[in-house]
Amino acid sequence: MEIEGAIALVTGGAQGLGLAIAAHLAALGARVVVADHNAETLSRLPEGLEPARLDVTQPAEVKAAVAEILARHERLDILVNNAGSIYSEAFVNLMNPAGIMHDYERFRRSLTVNLDSVFIVTSAVVEQMVRRRTGGAIVNISSISAGGNEGQTAYAAAKAGVNAMTVTWAKELGRWGIRCNAVAPGFIATVSTQGALTASVLKHIQDSTPLRRLGEASEVAQAVSCVIANDFINGAVLNVNGGLTI
């Protein structure tokens, strides 16, 4: 797909990794709509990015936002499902005798934010791609945690589900000219990563990575544009982790 001139929607794109992806696609010539629930961060978007306040867990709100984008731009070529939130909680916590097991409501909340949202937004976008016969490219932002990560039962389950949906949709949607891929970052030097992990854990990760460093948000953004631009990449889960999992 030619990125220049394409219309793209990036969810969770007002800061961090999502903003890096949105800015990179815009630099390549795409018209980028940035969807985020945070009005304050949306108000600080760089010039050229179009803000859209949106709760990606609400189907009716998502459908209305997609319809508004189509009314303004007449089509939607690219969807990047980046919205989500890193969540860590031990499955068993002996330090909390009143509730030693992982809380179910927090488990469900993490799945809603990290998995259900991908289904909700993709459903709304793909419906319009199919009805309008325009084709398109879907990129889901997964995670190294999809392979299972200690202390992240809910988050790992959600990202594993994202990978499974990616492959399933690649098989189903190709006949309509819609490709679906995922990019699975390792540990990236973002505020959310640094907030979720201690300094000692981050050092261990860097020491265990063949490249001996964390990734940069720009490197994930480049991977996203790669799977969009190459029309024969479909159903891939592209690891961007410096070789940590090899």
Image: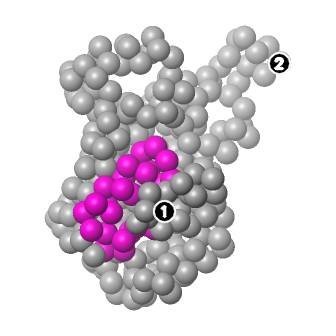
- Relative horizontal placement of residue 191, taking residue 215 as reference (left or right): right
Q: Position of residue 111 (x, y in %)?
A: 60, 46
> Residue 213 lies in what quarter of the image?
top left
Q: Nearer the viewer, mark 2 or mark 1?
A: 1
As measured in the structure, the alpha-carbon distance from the residue carrying label 2 to the one carrying label 1 is 42 Å
Label 2's element?
loop
Identified at 37% across, 13% down, the residue is 204
Identified at 79% across, 14% down, the residue is 97
Which mark, by number, is residue 34?
Answer: 1
The residue beneath circle 2 is 98
What colour scheme governs how the chains and residues are painted in the rendered image of this protein?
Answer: one colour
Q: Position of residue 66 (x, y in %)?
A: 53, 76
Q: Position of residue 194 (x, y in %)?
A: 48, 26
Type of amino acid under label 2: Ala
- Relative horizontal placement of residue 207, taking residue 85 as reference (left or right): left
From what the image shows, is residue 186 above or below residue 225? above
Asked if the stretch drawn in magenta spans residue 31, the answer is yes
Which mark, by number, is residue 233?
Answer: none
Identified at 83% across, 18% down, the residue is 98
Quarter holding the N terminus is: bottom left
> Which range is magenta?
6-33
Instruction: Pick whichever, 7 or 204, lies toward us.
Output: 7
Asked if the stretch drawn in magenta spans residue 140, the answer is no
